[in-house]
Image (spheres, grey):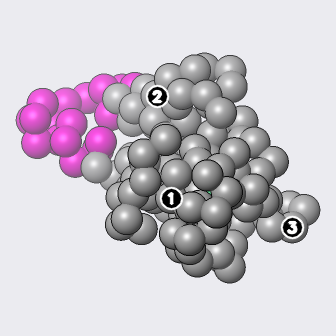
Amino acid sequence: MTKIQSTGLAMLQQRCPRCHEGHLFTHSAANPIHFAEMPERCPVCAQAYEPEPGFYWGAMFISYAFSTAIMLVTGFLVYFLLHDPAVWVYVTSVAVVAVLLTPLSLRYSRTLMLYWFGGVRYEPRNALKAG
Ligand SMILES: [Zn+2]
């Protein structure tokens, strides 16, 4: 696995907050059934991915913010690109885009939850010891 120095890039690529190497999710976001599965621990540095039971309940609020942003952006794009079409076009477009982006919204909300509230800092030396 490649090492990422930047915390922002590690978040974007959904890597372990401690070593920036281990993947946070076991399957691709395009996998319609297993897109939300996470290993219990980082395969590289053994950092626990769920610091306490129910930790990811808070990710619902981040996901709610993502969903709101996705719906607003989609609505504005439909308005400007299709020149204010009928209401059913808005509703259908927003619903389809929101459903299609659900895996990304869920994964990034969990990633942000772990980075912001997981109490884990980047420790490049731990990754070297484990590797
Ligand atoms: Zn790790």
Q: Is mark 1 within 8 Å of ligand 1?
A: yes
Between circles 1 and 2, the one closer to the viewer is 1
Mark 2: secondary structure: helix
Mark 3: secondary structure: loop
Q: Is residue 80 left or right of residue 123?
A: left
Q: Residue at coordinates 12% horizontally, 30% vertically from top-left?
A: 82
Bin the neighbour count of mark 3 within 10 Å (Cα to Cα): few under 14, some 14-19, many 20 and up: few
Q: Residue at coordinates 90% horizontally, 62% vertically from top-left?
A: 53
Mark 1: secondary structure: loop
CB under 8 Å between callouts 1 and 2?
no
Circle 3 residue:
52
Between circles 3 and 2, the one closer to the viewer is 3
> Is 62 placed above or below 123 here?
above
Q: What residue type is labelled 3?
A: Glu
| Mark sitting on residue 100 | 2
Q: In this view, does 59 lie to the left or right of 67?
A: right
Q: What residue type is labelled 1?
A: His
| Mark sitting on residue 20 | 1
Q: What residue type is labelled 2?
A: Leu
In this view, the residue in front, 111 or 15, is 15
Q: Dominant secondary structure of the magenta stretch?
A: helix
Tell me which segment is drawn in magenta.
74-92
